[in-house]
């Protein structure tokens, strides 16, 4: 099944190492290592995110804005397929591929004041950078 998804991004399953990744609280996530580069492949839980196309469009709009005004800000967004699609609809769901950020971690529960502070600081920075973003560009699921 993953072979068909990976092929749409120019990746060949037999040449990749594929491992489940993270806690999978909502989406199913895999770490894909092509030997040259690492990626995150997510199967979007469309029972939770009932309109994944709108979310995908919103992420793309925010990415375009940040690239234009803050090109050095690291904002992870979907990698386009060979056909230019950032969200792949396949038999049993929706998939997206992003670059893997080496050394990154996901925290599902805050265990210290430092983690809470850092999360708030990064959210504040993100919000500040989007202060001039036109919210009319966003769809509402």
Image (cartoon, helix red, strand yellow):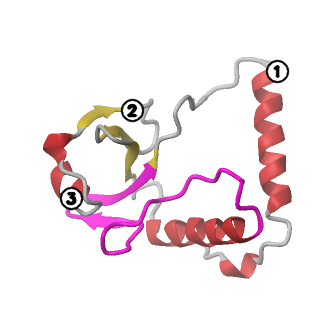
Residue 9 visible in the current orientation: yes
Calculate the distance from the C-alpha at mark 2 to the C-alpha at mark 3: 20 Å
Is residue 56 left or right of 66 when viewed as pictured? left
Give the structural element (helix, strand or loop) at label 1. Answer: helix
Q: Position of residue 76 (x, y in %)?
A: 57, 52
In this figure, what is the number of numbered marks? 3
Nearest the viewer among 13 and 44 is 13
Q: Nearer the viewer, mark 3 or mark 1?
A: 3
Among numbered discs 2 and 3, the one appearing first in the sequence: 3
Residue 113 badge: 1
Residue depicted at x 50% and y 67%:
56
Mark 1 surroundings: few (<14), some (14-19) or many (≥20) residues within 10 A: few
In this picture, which residue range is highlighted in magenta?
69-98
In the image, 135 versus 81, the foreground residue is 81
Q: Of label 2 and label 1, which has the lower sequence position?
A: 2
Residue 104: name its quadrant: top right
Q: Quadrant of residue 35?
A: top left
Give the vertical position of 3 relative to 36 (above or below).
below
Magenta-drawn stretch, dominant element (helix, strand or loop): loop
Q: Which residue is mark 2?
A: 21
The spot of residue 95 in percent (x, y) is 35, 57
Residue plotted at (71% across, 71% down) = 68
Is 56 in the magenta?
A: no
Which of the image's four quarters has the C terminus?
A: bottom right
Which residue is drawn at the image coordinates 38% and 72% (left, top)? 85
Rendered position, 138 above or below 116: below
From the image, state whether disc 2 or disc 1 is nearer to you.
Answer: 2
Instruction: Indicate yes or no whether the magenta region holds residue 88.
Output: yes
Contact between labelled residues 1 and 2, with CB atoms less than 8 Å apart: no
Question: Residue tagged by mark 3?
Answer: 7
In the rendered structure, the answer to whether residue 70 lies left or right of residue 90 reads right
Residue 52 appears at what percent x and percent y?
A: 45, 65
């Amino acid at each position: 099944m993953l072979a068909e998804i990976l092929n749409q991004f120019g990746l060949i399953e037999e040449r990749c190492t594929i491992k489940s990744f993270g806690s999978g609280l909502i989406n199913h996530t895999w770490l894909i290592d092509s030997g040259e580069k690492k990626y995150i492949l997510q199967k979007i839980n469309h029972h939770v995110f009932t309109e994944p196309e709108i979310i995908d469009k919103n992420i793309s709009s925010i990415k375009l804005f940040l690239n234009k005004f803050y090109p050095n800000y690291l904002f992870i967004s979907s990698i386009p397929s060979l056909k230019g699609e950032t969200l792949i609809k396949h038999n049993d769901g929706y998939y997206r591929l992003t670059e893997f950020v080496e050394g990154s971690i996901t925290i599902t529960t805050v265990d210290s004041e430092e983690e809470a502070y850092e999360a708030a600081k990064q959210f504040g920075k993100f919000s500040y950078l989007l202060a001039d973003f036109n919210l009319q560009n966003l769809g509402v699921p």
